[in-house]
Image (cartoon, coloured by chain):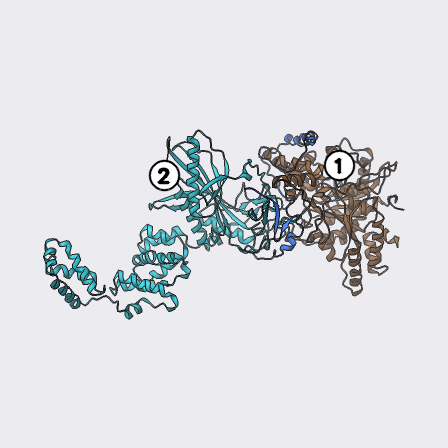
Chain colours: A blue, B brown, C cyan
Amino acid sequence: MLARIGLDEAEVPALAKELNTIIGFVEQLSEVDTEGVKPFTSPVENKMRWREDVVADGGYAEHVLANAPDKDDEYFAVPKVVE
Amino acid sequence: MSKLTDLNLAQARDGLVSKAFSAAELTQSHIERVEASDALNAYVLKTPEKAMDMAKASDEKISNGTAGPLEGLPIGVKDLFCTKGVRTTASSKILGEFIPPYESTVTQNLWNDGAVLLGKLNNDEFAMGSSNETSCFGPVNNPYQGANGENLVPGGSSGGSSAAVAARLGVAATATDTGGSIRQPAAFTGTVGLKPTYGRCSRWGVVAFASSLDQAGPITQTVRDAAIMLGSMASFDKRDSTSVERDVPNYEAALTGNIKGLRVGIPKEYRVDTMPAEIEALWQQGIDWLKDAGAEIVDVSLPHTKYALPAYYIIAPAEASSNLARYDGVRYGARQTGVDIDDMYSNTRAAGFGDEVKRRIMVGTYALSAGYYDAYYIKALQVRRLIAEDFDRAYEKCDVLLTPTTPSAAFAVGKQVEDPLEMYLNDVFTVTVNLAGLPGLSVPAGLDANGLPLGLQLIGKAFGEEELLRVGEVLETAAGFTTRPKQWWSA
Amino acid sequence: MASNQNLIAGATGDWEVVMGLEIHAQIASESKLFSGAATEFGAAPNSQVSLVDAAMPGMLPVINAYCIEQAVRTGLGLKAQVNKYSVFDRKNYFYPDLPQGYQISQFLQPIVGEGAIEIDLPDGSVKTIGVERLHLEQDAGKSLHDQHPSQSFVDLNRSGVALMEIVSHPDMRSAAEAQAYVKKVRAILRYLGTCDGNMEQGSLRADVNVSVRRPGDELGTRCEIKNVNSIRFIGQAIEHEARRQIDLIEDGGVVQQQTRLFDPKNGETRAMRSKEEAHDYRYFPDPDLLPLEFDQAFVDAIAKDLPELPDDKKARFISDYKLSPYDASVLVSEAENAAFFEAAAEGQDAKAVANMVIGSVFAGLNKAGLAIADSPVTPSQVGQLVGLISDDTVSNSIAKEVFEMMFDEGPDQGKDAHVIVEEKGLKQVTDMGAIEAAVDEVIAANPDKVTQAQERPKMAGWFVGQVMQATGGKANPQAVNKLVLAKLGLDS
């Protein structure tokens, strides 16, 4: 499934019921007339700031890899991926 | 020395400035109190050695005249803020023993100003909850107990922060608020909670729940303390594209006590049917207090209030489902094994996330999926605009709004955990503020019949924190809330 | 309209193959699209990774101004609509080299909209290919699958590198057209300097959407061949994929919409296992970013600074230098080649220069595996040499020899053409007396051939050859020809 969360068969009915309740709850939005209303994506109304193109970060592979559950020298290691 | 822990932040600061005691002494007494607080479960990580090192460094600065505005003041930090070299978990199993190689902007600002880290505070997992019961470290107990001595929740998601401040386990605490996570716990624990305007405090280094709603702020004992904390936490941060480039005013200087002529709006839609009479009465009391202080009371309407919670419960889970995709067991956190990569992801996320987080990820995934995107997600964003426009119209008639913070006082641990929807209703008065990106302040204003704290909420205009704090202090003074919880958690 | 020559014959009749391309072009920036980490190729694994690129908790993107400029520049170069308001979306999917669990891209509102480019086909014709859009997005990291029996290794150096995705309309009808399209896009990017176009290093790669249909039918179901990284492979991949689909349908099968990989080892495409499931990317506006906005003045300033692009240059070469469209398109395919030609052509016969640049310079460089920047012969040397042909100092064939000498000696010891001609005595003999003496000598020595030639005038060429040989190739061939004909009495 899209969320990539494994579920036990036994959990499914209860979870489905909860999700249906929540979906039922949010469905009351359909009552609202939103014809022509522009979606609100951020409370910030400023123009987005741009940063200069300079190398100012990176160069610390040891920090990047420090918390890795599994690594091989300079790489993160994961179960084999078949493309 | 235990008396040092009775001081609020401003008092402790003044004591340090006047050299009535040292930062080391102040910190030591807080460390001892934190050590004896395990029954509250407010701290998920204590850092006493680091605290003493920082306190000694502060004493050095105080003696050589280079002290910062928060020099030597011991605080707790919600475990959602990444702290360099100090384990950060968002109270989720999935982060395992994650040790950030970086410091969040907000906490860095606090350390730059001299604050001392006592430890990391419990919270609902990834800040998803209103009772602090979804934490992988277990629930936090409210320092206030029920009439029959039963344990109550401290609110959430910043339950560790609110409990710690109410129990004097630090002079203040950092917190975050996505739908009410600062104000609701503050109301449940007789503390002050300030959710600043979206963009006022940097989100850089704060574990994200819902990016367009999350905002850091303080939980403190007094409104003045909140003003002092915000002055340090707030900053413009070019590393956060949603941080607003704006000078940080002297919030403490805004506390003039004068609100003559200020127009206070009372939104009629907040008078919900299910509201207990004592909350209704407290709200009326608050109106009278502000009127007595010279404010003008104005009735206003926020017609889309009813739709705030459903909109929130689409937008927040949608953003969360994406924000939490990075917890995949590849680069950090607790990985579970799997036969292949997809199996590893599924196992890692199944074991790492708690039920509420899973529920929200699934709701969010659903709301964003191709067939439902317009009907749910876009619809919710449109309603969000209508809610924001409600506030714009209200502010044509008034300067701040006054509402209750919560529809009830703190409830018993375990009482609502079985019913997600009932839990969501805790945020009914607070969530509109996040949707509109406005600042909100909860001030302890009274007690219910069981002697439990109740809060009143003030809502300001965008970047109107000075005015908000000014009114908040007037309300605080009028309410004269001095109740302290009985110290049942340690001898 | 598709010309018939593009149709592919199947067992049951003719098929038309339809292609659209998504070209991923890495922006030639110093740092990444949303972080300050370096983008240089070939660095040690994970050494060019910021906390943002590794998607550490609480890390936030901040956009690179230079990348915005380059996208606008490219949009203008593609003669496309530049959108002054665009939006970054998250494209959500799980993959180990996608640290955030989503790619920041632009979905509904890209920075550049509709445009068009003209491609030059081998038969000399020109076809217009529609560009649907260009958007900015992050590259993913890199997974290595062949280093360990049960594990894949992840290097995030590429994670977050700025890409422009250029999406064409499904306007192409043959592998040759698709190849010409990629060549043309690559040339435009390189002219603009927005992407180095290096396909070997992955700075430019294409996803090719291929479908087949009966001529005149609706579009068929398409397969997407991912990440093809050479122009030759694009051709092979398309040809194999079109044939596979035709065979499949003719055998009663149905083409499944699918993501496929091209394997250069066997020249075949195969379905990607990891991408088999239908994707629902759940795009939504990235709440960590704000809409991307700029004003017309920003666009105008970039437009003002735009270099002459291949099409304009080609038109100018045709009108100013009187070159053939073919020669012009060969010369403008790379900005450096065009510049070499223009420098060489200064004050010289441009057509002759074009011939020498294409016939000798490019061929020589190709053979030696050298880039134009490393050419042992400079443009001015080429110009001078052409000058020597023009003023009859040397013949074309001598000029070729001289060129080879200059090319082999290289730029350091390299002598200018007139010096070589002087030293080696290669100067064309234009002294009529000397030429006449040589002609007389050959005629006198070959009376039998004279008789033959008078019967069969084509034999005159044999005399010209003998005279040229006798003069070491230095005699002016026209003069020899004229004299031979006159002496043999064939000039009437």
The chain letter under disc 2 is C
Q: Disc 2 residue type?
A: Asn
x then y, percent, for residue C386 = 30, 62
x then y, percent, for residue B183 = 76, 43
Q: Which residue is mark 2?
A: C6
The chain letter under disc 1 is B
Q: Which residue is mark 1?
A: B426
Q: Are marks 2 and 1 in contact (CB under 8 Å)?
A: no
Judged from this view, the residue extending furthest toward the bottom is C423
Judged from this view, the residue extending furthest toward the front is C149
Location of the N terminus of chain B (image quadrant): bottom right
Q: Which residue sits at x=61%, y=55%?
A: A58
Query: In the rendered view, does C486 fall on the left or right side of B252?
Result: left
x then y, percent, for residue C341 = 36, 58
Q: CA distance from mark 2 to mark 1?
A: 67 Å
Picture quadrant of residue C343 = bottom left
Give B222 or C198, whichever is nearer the viewer: C198
